[in-house]
Amino acid sequence: MLFALKASIAALIFAIGMSATMSDIIYVWRRPLLLVKSLLAMYVIVPLLAVLMARGLDLPWGTEVALMVLAICAGAPLLPKKLIKLGGDPSYVFSLVVTTSLLAVVTVPAGLHVLSRYTSFDSPTTPLQIGTTLLKGFLLPLGAGMLVRVASPVVADMLGDPLLKVASAVLAVCALVLLVASFHLVIELGLPSLLAFAAFTLMALGTGHILGGPDRGQRTALALACAGRHVGLALLVAASYRGPRTLTLVAGYLVASAMVSIPYIRWRSKAIPAANPESAPQVRG
């Protein structure tokens, strides 16, 4: 099951890479105001909200740690497909996801250092470990997909969509099996923890929605990017801490986050016309 999960994620990111170009990747870097607003939302406001929740609410210690670790692990590499289907600008989506994944090499260790200064949380996770996780799990399959597109746009167009559908289906099945297998553990977390994860997701969505600006696609993209966490990095960090049950807490977050995010996604899918070849920005081959 674990192999199928990792393989489906790699295939999904590889397929995403076959629809992106370097121009798409650096899109947000050419728009300083949009870049600043995006980073402010994801790296300042959302982590600050997590700290305020941990300090202001009477939550189990493990839940407080999970909130703060999830907050500093910004970036959700599996979001592009979802955001583009909602009508988001493909260039902004790709650029935002790649930028946050690259920044994680610096921001996650820095965030852990801050946590160790003000809490008893101390993780031995190093920038090298984080960089290796990002390289193997995201950057290599993304880069390979982009190389295929450069070498043969026709092949990329022919294989990209079918591979995306198959990988998404396998990933959904794996996630469902893991969720069912650990659901009793999620219930054991208790209502306060699940509500805290849901509230954190709701505030993150609101932050991105407000700072996303007047463009509906960018607003929705930033909202979901703020609410999404890089679960792989969160697992890497939390696994080094001998305290809360890592898998249980992450599963609890995913369940609570989905309960909040799904209604938002449905609302935005009605507010934004679905992307199509005639109306959506085209990814250049």
Image (spheres, rainbow, N blue to C red):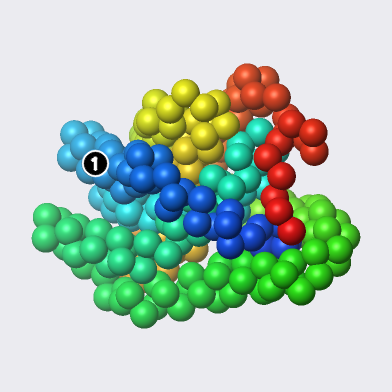
Q: Quadrant of residue 41?
A: top left
For the question of whether residue 256 can be seen, the reply is: no
For the question of whether residue 108 can be seen, the reply is: yes
For image coordinates 45% across by 57% down, the residue present is 99
Instruction: State how many labels appear.
Output: 1
Q: What residue did someone put label 1 on?
A: 48
The answer to whether 95 appears left or right of 164 in the picture is left
Q: In the picture, which quadrant includes the C terminus?
A: bottom right
Secondary element under disc 1, as helix, strand or loop, is helix
For image coordinates 71% across by 36% down, the residue present is 280
Point out residue 160 in the picture as x, y percentages from the top left corner: 80, 59
Is 117 drawn above or below residue 28 in the view shown?
below
Mark 1 neighbour class, 10 Å CA radius: few under 14, some 14 to 19, many 20 or more: some
The answer to whether 252 appears left or right of 70 in the picture is right
Closer-to-camera residue (12/19): 19
Closer-to-camera residue (81/260): 81
Q: In the picture, which quadrant includes the N terminus?
A: bottom right
For image coordinates 32% across by 62% down, the residue present is 108
Is 4 drawn above or below residue 70 in the view shown?
below
Is 137 drawn above or below residue 71 in the view shown?
below
Closer-to-camera residue (58/107): 107
Point out residue 153 in the picture as x, y percentages from the top left corner: 80, 64
Q: Quadrant of residue 148?
A: bottom right
Is 122 drawn above or below residue 160 in the view shown?
below
Point out residue 87 in the picture as x, y percentages from the top left corner: 66, 33
For image coordinates 83% across by 58% down, the residue present is 157
Closer-to-camera residue (105/242): 105
Q: Amino acid at mark 1?
A: Leu
